[in-house]
Amino acid sequence: MIKDLLRRQRIETPSWAFGDSGTRFKVFAQAGVPRDPYEKLADAAQVHRFTGVAPTVALHIPWDRVADYADLASRAAELGVGIGAINSNVFQDDAYMLGSVTNPDPKVRARALDHLLECVDIMDATGSATLKLWFSDGTNYPGQDDIRSRQDRLAQALERVYARLGAHQRFLLEYKLFEPAFYVSDVPDWGTAYAHCLRLGDKAQVVVDTGHHAPGTNIEFIVAFLLREGKLGGFDFNSRFYADDDLMVGAADPFQLFRIMFEVIGGGGYDAEANVAFMLDQCHNIEPKIAGQIRSVMNVQEATAKALLVDRAALAVAQAAGDVLGANAVVMDAYNTDVRPLLGQVRTEMGLDPDPMAAYARSGYFERVRDERVGGAPAGWGA
Ligand code: PSV
Ligand code: MN
Ligand code: MN
């Protein structure tokens, strides 16, 4: 039973994880990185090939702009992967210095809206069912702009995008505490995202990027609450030590990742019908990218396996009896289980190597692309 559930897991990789990335101080160029979106898909296909649970790739527009999106989708299918969420980008043009959809200038707002609607066109062309919206909008100084007016402008833009969605499409609204705005962010927290989505309807849901909270925030509570309300659309998984570090998920705090998956499973978010998208949003600044993605997928699998191992019946008994220590022990017993042998078995039964990292290293893929590709493209941040 647990093995079946692990076999059916789906984790989406981000196209931008395969290109060069860095901080505002330096983008380190790595050998063999993709030169175009097609090569990013080829790399993502390797992650799926060795893990068996990463069959879709998220795109970021315009970082992944191509002449023919239907062609990109069919190439993906040939490689054995599909196109996942389309991520909009209204944060890197000069025009957006004072905001995109919340900008006081109507011309800038119109330009941003055009881009968001173009992203829905790309969903139509690629067969993607999910649009991911993140706005860098906000202000740096008290008085710079009117907080309430900016909320009105945001609501108007969201209404327009919502109206453009097809029957099987949805958008996920992403919140972030701060950065690049340092005083007010227009979508700073889950409550703001939730309120906007609630007004719009079922096709608007919240996406939880695990790196977008203040230190100490109880993310699993947010997950439990949103799931209960049918408003948890998905995750951007990554881990953080300080701010939005975009490190490999499960690297900084595997216990938090376990606690999140425990709530996901308890709230029915792991069931296919719940349609919760488990996406990675990471940058591999100093580590090799494909291997970094494989490690991240494995970290999610391990947290999931541990969360699935929690003896829910024993937990319910302990909770009903008010047995604080007993209930906590049930959860900790699962967390402290070494699930690597179980996952190795699952992979073997799927016809995969039980050790994806070693199998990828042995495959010679990296050496091949390193020799073939000269002059890789940055992930987007430096583009
Ligand atoms: C913003 O920090 C964010 O988390 C959004 O999801 C962007 O699309 C993404 O990072 C780019 O890596
Ligand atoms: Mn994100
Ligand atoms: Mn982020």
Image: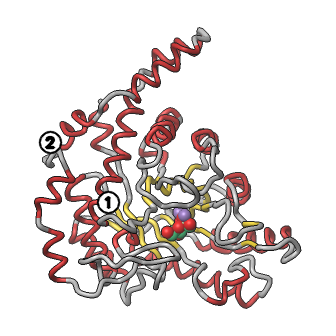
Q: CA distance from mark 1 to mark 2?
A: 21 Å
For mark 2, does the 10 Å Cα neighbourhood hold few (<14), some (14 to 19), or many (20 or more) residues? Answer: few
Residue visible at 46% across and 48% down in the picture? 252
Q: Is residue 308 above or below residue 155?
A: above
Residue 172 appears anywhere in the view: yes
At horizontal 65% and vertical 72% (from top left) the residue drawn is 180
Q: Is mark 1 within 8 Å of ligand 1?
A: no
Identify the residue shown where x is 77% and y is 87%.
106
Q: Amino acid at mark 1?
A: Gly
Task: Name the residue nearer the viewer: 7 or 304.
Answer: 304
Q: Position of residue 37 (x, y in %)?
A: 34, 80
Residue 132 visible here: no
Q: Considering depth in this image, is 21 or 165 the residue closer to the camera? A: 21
Q: Is residue 95 left or right of residue 344?
A: right
Where residue 183 sits in the image (x, y, percent)? 77, 67
Q: Secondary structure at mark 2?
A: helix
Crowd rating for badge 1 (residues with CA inside 10 Å; few <14, some 14–19, many 20+): many
Determine which quarter of the picture holds residue 54: bottom left
Q: Which residue lies under the disc numbered 2?
A: 348
Q: Which residue is mark 1?
A: 292
- Nearest the viewer among 14 and 194 is 14
Q: Position of residue 190 (x, y in %)?
A: 67, 53
